Image (cartoon, helix red, strand yellow):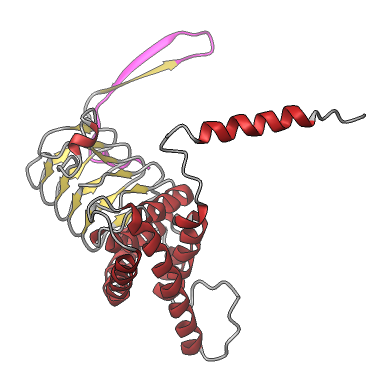
């Protein structure tokens, strides 16, 4: 079949699109070399896993017999590429105002050095998260299984990396990191959230944790949980305000629960049952559950039967 191509029509299409690029839209920027590279950020996350969990992750590029020499090469490579991406990202920082290229390079180097100085702290926190996952999940065969296979620990690891950059007010990059984890695991943790030690996500798919959420130590969360805002209708006017709940130490939140609002505080050692919807504070040492659920059954001849199910001691098991 003969291909029909009218060069003048194609040329006109190109001309029309180029003309549209001059319309002053926010999406018009075409300087691809002056932006953080999304794919490179994803590769940085993968590389950081190699130094956070030495011996568990490798890319096969470095064939070096001395492991310490290999890790030194990886660390230097990550530092170089992170420094480059942070320098580009700082051009977008409305909090710092206009910066010269030299100022951005100096600030980027400082940020990257501070970040790498905190890697021992990140690893210390993740050691507690690993312990919480192993102690809290009878299905966990070993610590290695959790590191290599559990999406919850993957999402928490990326969050803890991104959170350190978020605290340094690095634009764009922390969100690119956590959204990468979101795409891999189905777990959406904003890098601005504050999360304590011994944090355990079981299963995890569909979890959302908002930017201003505060989560204490020894908190356990199941799949489908939302720790979110009551409303975002105020848009940018709400930026910087606390919109998400505070979850105190020792809280367990079962599957499908929604906890909303910046003034909502869930007290210590409280257990939140599955599919609950909470918009007010809960006192410590409380058990919250849905009661008298009604289930409907349809037989083959479409006869309806209804029965109220009053949940007993096992109400909180939602998996």
Main secondary structure of the magenta stretch = loop
- In the current view of this chain or complex, which residue is farthest to the bottom? 66
Looking at this view, is 218 or 108 the one in front?
108
**Residue depicted at x 60% and y 76%:** 61
Residue 301 part of the magenta-drawn span: yes
Question: Residue 31 placed where, x, y %?
Answer: 50, 51
State the extent of the magenta-drawn residues as a range: 298-319
- In the current view of this chain or complex, which residue is farthest to the right? 1
Question: Residue 225 placed where, x, y %?
Answer: 31, 41
**Residue depicted at x 48% and y 59%:** 42
* Residue 137 visible, this angle: no
* Residue 283 visible, this angle: yes
Q: Hey, which quadrant is residue 127 in on the image?
A: bottom left
**Residue depicted at x 59% and y 32%:** 17
Q: Is residue 104 left or right of residue 4?
A: left
Question: Residue 28 placed where, x, y %?
Answer: 47, 39
- In which quadrant is the C terminus drawn? top left
- In which quadrant is the N terminus drawn? top right
How many numbered marks appear?
0
Against 271, is 93 above or below? below
Q: Hey, which quadrant is residue 147 in on the image?
A: bottom left
Looking at this view, is 92 or 201 the one in front?
92
Residue 269 part of the magenta-drawn span: no
Question: Residue 67 placed where, x, y %?
Answer: 50, 87
Against 34, is 13 above or below? above
**Residue depicted at x 47% and y 48%:** 183
Against 172, is 21 above or below? above
Looking at this view, is 78 or 137 the one in front?
78
């Amino acid at each position: 079949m003969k291909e029909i191509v009218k060069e003048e029509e194609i040329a006109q299409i190109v001309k029309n699109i180029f003309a549209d690029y001059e319309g002053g839209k926010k999406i018009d920027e075409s300087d691809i070399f002056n932006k953080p590279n999304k794919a490179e950020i994803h590769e940085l996350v993968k590389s950081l896993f190699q130094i956070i969990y030495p011996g568990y992750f490798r890319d096969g590029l470095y064939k070096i017999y001395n492991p310490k020499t290999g890790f030194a090469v990886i660390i230097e490579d990550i530092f170089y590429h992170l420094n480059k991406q942070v320098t580009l990202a700082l051009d977008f920082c409305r909090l710092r105002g206009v910066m010269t290229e030299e100022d951005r390079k100096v600030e980027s180097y400082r940020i990257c050095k501070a970040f790498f100085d905190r890697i021992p702290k990140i690893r210390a926190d993740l050691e507690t998260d690993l312990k919480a996952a192993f102690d809290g999940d009878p299905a966990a065969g070993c610590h290695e299984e959790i590191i290599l296979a559990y999406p919850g620990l993957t999402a928490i690891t990326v969050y803890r990396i991104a959170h350190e950059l978020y605290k340094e007010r690095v634009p764009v990059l922390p969100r690119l990191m956590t959204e990468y984890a979101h795409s891999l695991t189905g777990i959406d943790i904003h890098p601005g959230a504050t999360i304590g030690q011994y944090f355990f996500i079981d299963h995890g798919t569909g979890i959302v944790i908002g930017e201003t959420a505060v989560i204490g130590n020894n908190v356990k969360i199941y799949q489908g949980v939302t720790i979110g805002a009551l409303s975002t209708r105020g848009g940018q006017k709400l930026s910087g305000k606390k919109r998400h709940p505070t979850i105190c130490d020792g809280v367990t939140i079962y599957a499908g629960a929604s906890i909303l609002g910046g003034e909502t505080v869930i007290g210590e050692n409280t257990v939140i049952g599955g599919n609950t919807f909470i918009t007010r504070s809960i006192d410590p040492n409380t058990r919250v559950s849905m009661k008298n659920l009604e289930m409907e059954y349809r037989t083959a001849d479409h006869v309806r039967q209804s029965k109220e199910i009053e949940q007993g001691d096992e109400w909180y098991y939602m998996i």
